[in-house]
Image (cartoon, rainbow, N blue to C red):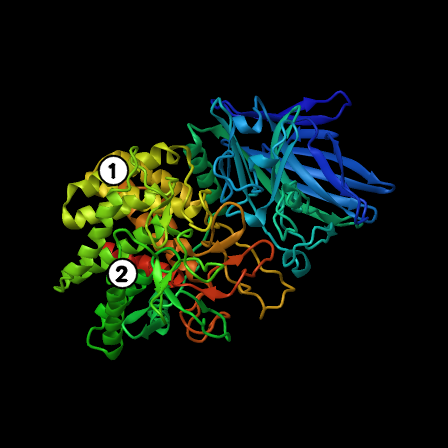
Amino acid sequence: MSALKNAAGTLGLSASNAGEPASVSQPAPLRVSLWNGRPDAAPVTLQGGYTSLRETAAGDWLGAGSLRVADGVTLEFTDRWDAAQNTLRLRREICVRGNASGGFTSVATFRVADARPWPEMEWFVPGMIYGNFDHMRPNSFGAGNYYKPGDYTVWIREDRMPAPLLAARLPSGASMAVLNSAPDGATTAAEGQGFSREPMADARFRFGAILAEERPDGTSLGYAFPGSEGTLSYGRKTGAGPETAQQWRHRFHPLTDGFVQRYEVSFRLGAAADTNDLVARSWRWAWDTLKPQVNPQPIETLRRCMVDVLEENFIEVEDRAGVQFLALAAPGGKPHPNPKTILGFTGYALGSAEMMLVEANREPASKRGRQLRADAEKAIASFLRRPIAPPVDEGFLLKTGGPALSTWPAAKKVTENQPIYLRSFCDDMKSLMRAYEREARAGRPRPEWLAWVRQFGDWLLTQEQPGGGFPRSWRALSGKLLDASATGTFNAVPFYTQLYRITGYKPYLDAAVRAGEFAWGTGHARARFTGGTIDNPDVIDKEAATLSLEGYLALHDATRDKKWLDRARAAADAAETWMYIWNIPMPADADGEKLHWKRGQSTVGIQLIATGHSLNDAYMCWDVESYARLARETGDPHYMEVARILLHNTKAMVGRPGDLRGTRGPGWQQEHWCFTLPRGLGRHREWLPWVTVSHLRGINDLMDYDPELYKQLAAQ
């Protein structure tokens, strides 16, 4: 680090890292956005340099200066900088002298040397930006539909982020990242549980914003405190056009005499070989800095309770049976008037049956065990009577037996214009094959189960595209091609690898290898894991990364080719960046009864879902075995840390005996929540089978992989 002398006599600073191509500078380190208190007034920016900057005996740098922001009002800055390896850490303190209406946000940034325009660089914000404009929903943070060369602003509230982190890679390979290395995140109910775009000033705001700005004189990365957000800010929109999203949500601290603002932010200089490397290096830095902690849960108690939730939602009508698709997770409410049971994704009809069978095997002689087995077998038999080559629906209405889909058609009637998805079938074909293998090991062969899966697998081979890709969806009722997009091809990889392992039929493995090569070559090599969530078509999402991790690990197991293990690591590194590794506190003044995410429970381990919104869920609870296996295969203990957090922390809001945590009973959990706006609330309070199946699969897969390891990780 070194001082910069400005023409006005003030001081700035610059820094570089020996052996790395990245370097940064800031001639005017003192910067605030100032609001005069009028609701319709836009804030103004004030900047300046230090009046003094010196190296202390301890080896850090102490910068001091002030900005006059109003008549009789001054902000006094004391900045303490320290450098360790390739990281610069700023600990800032600003004291307000004098009183005025309105408020201020302070900003700490560095300008990146040799930065290129935004589209020519690669960017990473966990759960939001992976690369550039590719596969981003319009009006997402960092999306290209509102990019303006030389005038581009991305300020994102840190409570939207799994880690308060932003990183950039230049074409030269140089990289820079910014991280709030000591996040707090507190807010008030009035601010955090609404969508107000009116400016607010409050001393209780303890959340910041990570930012990047492209200007004619260069590109800067930095941090703002408290966390104003713009030019894009999510929220309830009145229209569909970009003008409804491109608005600011300004937040300030008060200009009150004696008020002191304190925060910490770190900047990392380095290099990255490509986008996957940028993601992995930046995220590990954030992980090692924030040190996410395990939130121990009574796994065995919850396991039993969650199986009982599946049984509670089992419905049998005439010769049709299955776990219903939807129920209210909170007390009260009425049963759905027209329940359905659905394959894979959110419905997991066969996954539910699989988990019921696993539990039945634990107590085969008990009344509970016998009932679980009988009901699971009825559910499977109900699907085996339905056409699968080609498939014509994703499930059926339990009352009438009519076709049903994972979505509720607006017309309340399935038509040929509606999609059925590759993801839905591959998910639950894998469930049935796992059940088949367990039954075979127990001496109960189920050839009809495997025959049904093979019918689908053989038909799906006819749908493979010349390059190895598979379509996203087909038409309901006819099975004809609907959407040829191949971004979801990774779904076929673990399906065909598993089918090959059972049957030994090499064309299945060949299809898996071709699909894996296609998926890697068309996006995964550049950290673009897209097409996992079928209700967020072809956007970057975590489920694409987790399913790709499963597939690449399966290919490595089948072929022992190290390239598949390397690709599994890339998928795992991307997937875990959707997982919160810091705790977002619920508003202290919010009504605790109305909070869906209960105060005092750590948010560490819960994940964002997909780019384009800020909802969170516990989906990755099923990935415990994948990360444990990866830790063993690579010798990297970090992945075992991830596995333990995914096993425990994801169950923080599952009801348990004596503490229902706002749910209707032990084992219940609602589908999702929000940790930003509206903080602590979900869009709905519904349960879907995937919630419980994912938890149970994480437990049971780990037990199958290594019972002793399961005992170690499950121990509180």
**Residue at horizontal 65%, vertical 36%?**
108
Using the image, determine if residue 1 lies above or below residue 146: above
Residue labelled with disc 1: 513
Place residue 6 in its image quadrant: top right
Give percent across and percent down for residue 252. 72, 48
> Does 321 sit left or right of 149 as displayed?
left
**Residue at horizontal 69%, vertical 54%?**
196
Q: Quadrant of the N terminus?
A: top right
Q: From the viewer's side, name the closer residue of 6 and 591.
A: 591
Give percent across and percent down for residue 270. 48, 29
**Residue at horizontal 21%, vertical 47%?**
458
Give percent across and percent down for residue 30. 71, 34
Answer yes or no: is residue 632 visible.
Answer: no
| Dot 1 alpha-carbon crowd within 10 angstroms: few under 14, some 14 to 19, many 20 or more | many
Give percent across and percent down for residue 494. 27, 46
Q: From the viewer's side, name the closer residue of 174 and 319.
A: 319
Using the image, determine if residue 566 lies above or below residue 192: above
